[in-house]
Amino acid sequence: IIMVGPGTGVAPYRGFFQERAALQAQGSAIGESLLFFGCRHPQQDYIYEDEFKTFAEQGVIELYTAFSRWEGHEKMYVQDQILAHKERVWELLQQDAYIYVCGDASNMAPDVRKAFAMLYMEKSGASEQEAEQWLEALTTNNHYLVDIWPA
C-alpha cells in the first residue's frame, strides 16, 4: 500500500496502521506500506507524530515526511518525497501496490497524480499520454483511490 496524506488527510490511514500493528503482534505477516505525510512544520502541525513514528519503528509502515514551512530547510511536499523515493515507490508499484490519496483536491491531489505520472514516464519510457492512460487504468482497477475535498 502506498498512502499519501498531508495534514488531516492522514487521519483515515490510522485504522490501517492499528489493524496491521495488531496483526503483526499476533504473528501474522503484513504487507509493505509506505506513508507520505506532509504538513507545514514538524513542531506545529505534525499530527499523530508519536504514533506514526512508533508504527515505523515496529515495521508497520515506512514513513516519509514532508514539511513545507520549516525554517532553515528546503520546502518539501508529499509529491517531492514520492519522487525522492521513486525507487522504493516503483518497487511496490511493480508488485501491484494500491495507492491511496487523501486530502486537498485543489493542489495536493493533482500534484501527487503528476508525480506518479512522472515516475511512470521515467521508469517505463512512456509518454505523458501513456502515463495518463496508466493512471486511468489504475483508477479503473481500484489501484489508485482518492478521497479528496476542496481546500
Image (cartoon, helix red, strand yellow):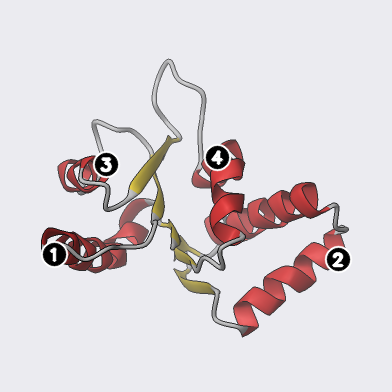
Residue at the (24%, 31%) spot, across then down: 43
**In the image, residue 105 lies at what x, y percent?**
52, 65
Label 2 packing within 10 angstroms: few (<14), some (14-19), many (20+): few
Residue 134, numbered circle: none
Q: Earlier in the sequence, mark 3 or mark 4?
A: 3
Give how far apart the Cα atoms at labels 1 and 4 are: 27 Å
Q: Earlier in the sequence, mark 3 or mark 1?
A: 1
Q: Considering depth in this image, is 19 or 31 the residue closer to the camera?
A: 31
Disc 1 designates what residue? 22
Which amino acid lies under the numbered mark 2 shown in the image of this protein?
Answer: Gln
Residue at the (56%, 47%) spot, across then down: 79
Disc 2 designates what residue? 129
Disc 3 designates what residue? 46
Residue at the (50%, 69%) spot, across then down: 98
- For numbered disc 3, what is the local secondary structure? loop
Residue 85, numbered circle: 4
Give how far apart the Cα atoms at labels 3 and 4 are: 21 Å
- Above or below residue 87? Residue 97 is below
Q: Are marks 2 and 3 in contact (CB under 8 Å)?
A: no
Q: Are marks 2 and 1 in contact (CB under 8 Å)?
A: no
**Quarter of image, res 127:** bottom right
Q: Nearer the viewer, mark 1 or mark 4?
A: 1
Q: Earlier in the sequence, mark 1 or mark 4?
A: 1
**In the image, residue 143 lies at what x, y percent?**
55, 74
Residue at the (16%, 47%) spot, across then down: 51
Give how far apart the Cα atoms at labels 4 and 2 are: 23 Å
Give how far apart the Cα atoms at labels 2 and 1 are: 42 Å
Which amino acid lies under the numbered mark 3 shown in the image of this protein?
Answer: Tyr
Judge from the rendering whether residue 17 lies leftward or rightward of residue 129; answer left or right.
left
Which amino acid lies under the numbered mark 1 shown in the image of this protein?
Answer: Ala
Q: Considering depth in this image, is 74 or 25 the residue closer to the camera?
A: 25
